[in-house]
Amino acid sequence: MARVNENFAVLEDSYLFSQVAHKVADFSAAHPEKKIIRLGIGDVTLPLAPVVVTAMQKAAAEMGVKETFRGYGPEQGYDFLHEALVKYYAGFGVTLESSEIFISDGAKSDCGNITDIFDDANVILVPDPVYPVYLDTNIMRGRKIVFMEGSPENGFLPMPDPTVKADIIYLCSPNNPTGAAYSKAQLKEWVTYACQNGAVILYDAAYEAFIEDETLPRSIFQIEGAKECAIELCSLSKTAGFTGTRCGYTVVPLRLMRKTKNGKEMSLNKMWLRRQTTKFNGVPYIVQRAAEAVFTPEGQRQCRENLAYYKENARLIGAALQEKGITYYGGTNSPYIWMQCPRQMKSWEFFDFLLEELNIVGTPGSGFGSSGEGWFRLTAFAGRKATEEAVERFRKLL
């Protein structure tokens, strides 16, 4: 008899965003006359930058000509995109080798897939509140998980606890869901902790392009010693609106080495290369040409215009909350606003209130972990008119 992975039985019955979608669908069916404003799931609303579309069209045309047609590409990505990323990282002081870069279909996939190269006996340290993928992918493997609490006292930026020994550490900065971002000094503490304990940091930099404060790191590799203890995962989903186009990348330093339980030293870079060449066929050529265009000077200019649009949405939401005397985090250096639920409401209680009374959809903080109870996530990815209307509803009714 075939036996299933019993760890799936431990998972929550419903993925957070699916639960939100069901509630919204039920309300919409019961009240079709209501105009619902969606500030929940972080999907972008602006179209791809023109230079990206042009590059994609050109690449598609190449695929229709025998002389320029391409079949299977390298699983780790084409050289032209590697070269673009090497230059991009050099722009904030990070030197990368092309062989350290692996092109993927997005950071979410790699956050889960990267666990393939680690033993299930590892102890996993995740922040709470936390992006659900970090937690669920390790529950699926039956690993021991330890939580580090984010709270107003630490600015929702938990720091190393020397009494806690962990092997794999998930960090996200700017953070999803809280919008908080680590300083260089704070990340240095994490790098020191990881090196002292032989741990590996899985650093999710999916929102690095939203950072405005030049003193904040865009990459963990801006921290000395990080190439001996960290893997960085990034995505073009929010940077360039690739949520439906699907492209990201993971950086695994050549210097990152760890041992098997029998003491054999292994290169994590070579292990990830083997995993990808075995289980992944690569990102389509057309998409990679589109991604390459993101990192051209014109592509950067056009993408920054879109990012500025979302940042203004975040500013408008934050200003309205501040007027109402509501505590919140994020909204700068991040597309997320992490607000305290008013009137001491619970997270799902406030979700129902917003949906039923204001017809606004957000995400309950408790869905990101127990430390998120009493908090709520709003996103800046709606259209400007929708955001402005939501802000007016906040001002009148919240």
Image: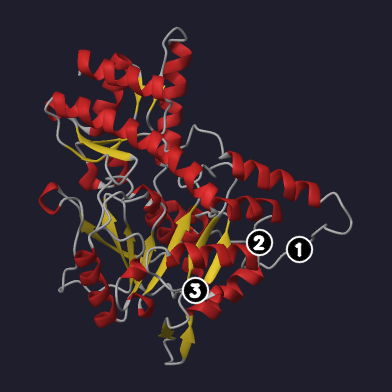
Left or right, residue 305 beside residue 77: left
Q: Position of residue 395 (x, y in %)?
A: 21, 17
Circle 1: residue type: Tyr
Circle 2: residue type: Gly
Disc 1 to disc 2: CB gap under 8 Å: yes
Q: Residue furthest right?
A: 66
Q: Mark 2 points at which residue?
A: 282
Quadrant of the rendered structure where residue 204 is? bottom left
Residue found at x 25% / y 49%: 180
Q: Can residue 203 be seen in this view?
A: yes
Left or right, residue 127 beside residue 111: left
Which residue is nearer to you in this view: 235 or 93?
93
Residue found at x 37% / y 68%: 93
Circle 3: residue type: Ile
Q: Name the residue under label 1.
A: 72
Q: Where is residue 347 in the image (x, y as percent from the top left)?
A: 24, 33
- Disc 3 element: helix
Cα distance in 3D space between marks 3 and 2: 18 Å
Q: Position of residue 78 (x, y in %)?
A: 65, 65
Disc 1 to disc 3: CB gap under 8 Å: no
Residue found at x 60% / y 39%: 50
Q: Which numbered tag is attached to residue 208?
A: none
